Image (tube, rainbow, N blue to C red):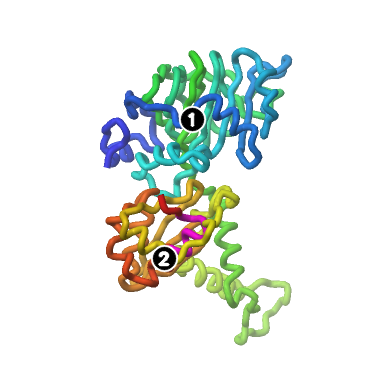
Amino acid sequence: MQLPGGLPADQFLRDYWQKKPLVIRQAFPGITSPVSADELAGMACEDGVESRIVIEDDGGKPWQLHNGPFPPERFEALPESHWTLLIQGLDHWVPEAADILEHFRFVPNWRLDDIMASYAPVGGSVGPHFDQYDVFLLQAEGHRRWTFGGRCDDSSPRVEGTPLRILSDWQGEETVTLAPGDMLYLPPGVGHHGIAEDDCITLSIGFRAPSVDDVLTGFSDFLCSQPGAGQPLADPELECQDNPGAISDDALTRVHEVIASRLNDRRQLALWFGQFSTSPKNAELLEPAEPPVQASDVHDAIAQGLALRWNEGSRFAYHEFEQDTALFVDGEQFILRGDARQLAPQLCRGNRICARDLADIKDDPALCGLLCNLINQGHLYLE
């Protein structure tokens, strides 16, 4: 596997991933932005689209943040320069943007967050800052000058009077200008500041990992919902002790055994993590097929060579157990056995599943039924 631009993926993961920045010239040669500035402005006026405007000097206040949706006239009132429009989850709304993600499948699906589009006129910026996640900054239109370098954390000095986490007294280590098709990779915690040199659009492909708190609370909540979780702790071998106020080692051992028995159940852990990591960011995007399709429709479509495609807001992953395979789709699990296990890796490899990859599946009524359900629930659609 290779990164856009040709660097072997294993070399990138070994030398750069979460270690140091990387500039990739012409990672996407000849790129055309999947959206225009006017289209981004139109999206910012829509309910359900997460949009923000950042103004560097807003009536004397530094780096002010405004959240959408916005009325169309809001854009007429913006200054001529030094502001930025941000559209989160562009890949959820624009299939051409979702296709860009197919170039980054060397990172597991569950690590992907989304694509954020940033439009800015001359001087536009969101200020010097750092992120807690890995990001590829792809220049889709115009030019942006990036200064980056130096590790930052929550103790790094911040600008006061702004709701944003803007770094103060920060000096980068390197400066580059990205032209259309160029890309910059930044690990978590690396300070960076991008300033538009002309009207430009930058696509931020973000990869997040859950926090330790997310993992602990999420898995414990899952365990508490399993059968038997309400059963009280048993102590049939209880013995008299000198002081009733003492918590004995035997009591702690019993509690430890209960906790350890749940934590050591790898199947339960895998089933929880698959559902947790594929939960959609915006479940409203999962629109059921209208009209609903039948299993015979799916069979005929595959026979005719039609491809299946993920809903732009959907997430797919799978885990192979010894006897079966768990397919995870948008927070739901499907247990596949026997020959059906082959379907999971085929559905999860990329956002478009060619008919030839489903040729052996179309004659299996159960698998066609599963594909039919995924289409009717809005996770897949026929292209």
Q: Quadrant for residue 288, please give it.
A: bottom right
Structural distance between the alpha carbons of marks 2 and 1 = 36 Å
Q: Residues within 10 Å of mark 2 (few under 14, many from 20)?
A: many
Q: Mark 2 points at which residue?
A: 326
Say whether residue 382 is magenta. no
Residue at 39% x, 19% y is: 179
| Residue 293 in the image, given as x and y percentages of width and height | 47, 62
Q: Can residue 308 be seen in this view?
A: yes
Query: What is the number of the mark on residue 179?
Result: none
| Residue 226 in the image, given as x and y percentages of width and height | 57, 72
Residue at 45% x, 24% y is: 149
- Mark 1 lies on a secondary structure that is loop
Labels 2 and 1: the sequence-earlier one: 1
Question: How many labels sit on residues?
Answer: 2
- At label 1, the amino acid type is Val
- At label 2, the amino acid type is Ala
Q: Which of 338 and 154 lies nearest the eye of the viewer? A: 338
Q: Can residue 266 be seen in this view?
A: no
Q: In this view, does 277 lie to the left or right of 3?
A: right
Q: Is residue 64 left or right of residue 252?
A: right
Q: Which of 334 and 59 lies nearest the eye of the viewer? A: 334
Q: Name the residue under label 1.
A: 35
Residue at 47% x, 25% y is: 150
User: Which residues make up the magenta segment?
Assistant: 372-380
